[in-house]
Amino acid sequence: WDLAHAVGNVPLNLHDDGPDFACWCSYKYLNSGPGNIAGCFVHERHATNDKLNRFAGWWGHRKEDRFVMSHNFIPSPGAQGYMLSNPSVLCCAALRASLD
């Protein structure tokens, strides 16, 4: 599901509503600004499926051996396995203030 204009605007119950995946931006109703953090939801029924296509980023690698730096990508379970990069501290601060 595309939740770009839903996150921060209406209550969401993604797990109970049952989409396989959902994604959203935070610039509109979470007041973070363009280029800020995006989010994704991966239903738990897909949490350990490492055969799904994804952009494999270092932050999505399994935490237990992330620093081994092997040539094999082993995803973390759930949405965390889709992380590509670390977010900017300033972007996080703006988003945190909005969520508070």
Image (tube, helix red, strand yellow):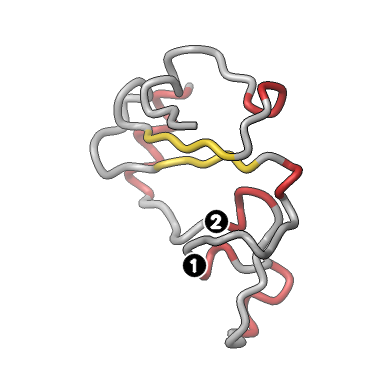
Task: Identify which amino acid the numbered label 1 is placed on.
Answer: Gly
Where does label 1 land, which residue?
Answer: 57
Is residue 44 shown left or right of residue 22?
Answer: right
Q: CA distance from mark 2 to mark 1?
A: 7 Å
Which of the pair 3/20 is nearer the observer? 20
Rendered residue at 37%/35% (across/down) = 25
Element on which disc 1 rests: loop
The picture places residue 87, in percent across and down from the top left corner, at 41, 52
Task: Identify which amino acid the numbered label 2 is placed on.
Answer: Tyr
Which disc is residue 82 wearing?
2
Number of labels in the image equals 2
Rendered residue at 23%/38% (across/down) = 34
The picture places residue 56, in percent across and down from the top left corner, at 51, 67
Residue 43, image quadrant: top right
Which of the pair 22/30 is nearer the observer? 22
Is residue 99 shown left or right of residue 44?
Answer: left
